[in-house]
Amino acid sequence: MGRLVIVSNRVPVPKRGEPPAAGGLAVALKDAFSGRGGLWFGWSGTAAEEPADVVRHARRAGVDYAVIDLSQQAYDGFYAGYANSALWPMFHFRLGLLSYDRDQAECYRIVNRRYADKLMPLLRPDDTIWVHDYQMIPLGAELRARGSKHRIGYFHHIPFPPWAVFSAMPGSEELIRDLLAYDLVGVQTHRDLTGLMDCMAQGTGMKLRAGGEVRFRGRRTLLRSFPIAIATQEFADLAAESVKSAESQRFATSLVGRSLVIGAERLDYTKGLPERLRAFGALLERFPEHRGRVTYLQVAARSREDVESYKDLKREIETLAGRINGDYSDADWTPVRYVGRALPRGTLAGYYRMAQVGLVTPLRDGMNLVAKEYVAAQDPENPGVLVLSRFAGAAESMPEALLVNPLDAVGMAEAMNTALTMPLDERRDRHAAIFRRLRENSVESWAKSFLAVLEGKDGAEAAPSRA
Ligand code: GDG
């Protein structure tokens, strides 16, 4: 078996003497490398005025890590520009926030070309290449243009809208052709797969074959959904341990017997934070019995602060939180506690376990791992209730959560009230059903099933055709 080569925008290069990264792709792909070794390639996370044109290496447990810097100009155009000001809003159905600039789009392509130039000499003929996410869509085509005959797969972590939305993007046909350079394109959910197939059919004018297969210029591309998972038991153990810490105990004391409602995410307009705050305000207005009895902790980790729409969002959230606190606080009770930075993973896990209600209410989300982590963190004997947006990919596999439309503040307030007053038996039943499903779908099997299809080893599929 050849090596596995992962390409992602950020590379979790392990630092000497530090434990491996605790979250994200590093956990998901930990086992995918074992037994075959590999290479993880991508951006260093550094934008320099004069980027060193060298690929920096580290090697750990059979895996080479290779990263390159970006120039400040490339970073602005590629990352803050086209990827996060045009692709990100479009893929999340937010055409009103889509800001397209031809130079930035060109910069995105130049960066992907540079990645292909730097990656190509590092490849061996029998490598399997797995490219991650929207920052890298053209990479497969760029590698093919340089003669790559490898199996190359692409996984799209964020939603995939139908053609009616996708085609609003200038250059949409080109993006579809880029995807056709891959042997396998994976998305998170059935809903995303429907969007992807619609874009493939309408963007190329071709008919799709049964089973999600496109043939274009002698190449076959498979289209599949692979819902991403978490390391459920590990997270459950982390939460159970963390809740015993002095820090968690201090937090519990500060709640003085009040119920805790929690939300935690990157500060991003797709996550529905203003809508959620308004809904919490509606809860206090319409269900006055909760006044003085519920505390809502919102953790909002900073993200993409150099993108304009994110700055506006921060101001809006601070204003809303301030207004609710102004309207309802007492001398000894603050309804909204707002932490505007990331908390350590263990701390967060403990707080999830202490919360009677987990609010995960994005306007759109590929999957949303917080929804899964919140359920994993609960005490099965006395679990909290997940209030989940129907627009999160996670909703497809969590029908026992209280599903809400985040645009309906009163509906969300009602769901919060239902969650806060739900009898123990019902909470246990709902939790047990979701928890069982989380354990059945491990993060290891997510990576394995993607690679099995890509490498033609899933039994049902023949190996993807070569160009
Ligand atoms: C993209 C897609 C898809 C959050 N706040 C803190 C913190 N987090 C951690 C969470 C979770 C991770 O960050 C966020 O993952 P999500 O899935 O919720 O969201 P995105 O970052 O938007 O991820 C998404 C995902 O890719 C994977 O495919 O599910 O739909 O948008 O693990 O716990 N971690 C720490 N402190 C925080 O304050 N330590």
Image (cartoon, helix red, strand yellow):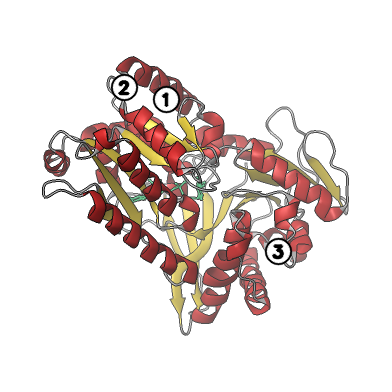
Question: Callout 3: 10 Å neighbours few (<14), some, many (20+)?
Answer: some
Q: Position of residue 59 (x, y in %)?
A: 43, 57
Mark 3 falls on what kind of element? loop
Q: Please tell me which residue lies in front, 335 or 395.
A: 335
Give the spatial CA distance, label 1 vs label 3.
39 Å
Q: Amino acid at mark 1?
A: Phe
Quick one: which residue is furthest to the top in this view?
425
In the rendering, which numbered label is found on residue 435?
Answer: 1
* Residue on which disc 2 sits: 380
Label 2 CB-ligand 1 distance < 8 A: no
Q: CA distance from mark 2 to mark 3?
A: 46 Å
In space, the residues marked 2 and 1 are separated at their CA atoms by: 9 Å
Viewer-nearest of labels 1 and 3?
A: 3
Coordinates of residue 177 in the picture (x, y in percent): 78, 58
Image mark for residue 169: 3
Residue 172 is left or right of residue 52, and the answer is right
Which mark identifies residue 449?
none
The kind of residue tagged 3 is Met
Residue occupying the point 30% across, 38% down: 352
**Label 1 neighbour load within 10 Å: few <14, some 14-19, many 20+:** many
**Which quarter of the picture shows residue 108?**
bottom right
43 left or right, relative to 134: left
Q: Can residue 332 be spotted in the picture?
A: yes
Q: Secondary structure at mark 2?
A: loop
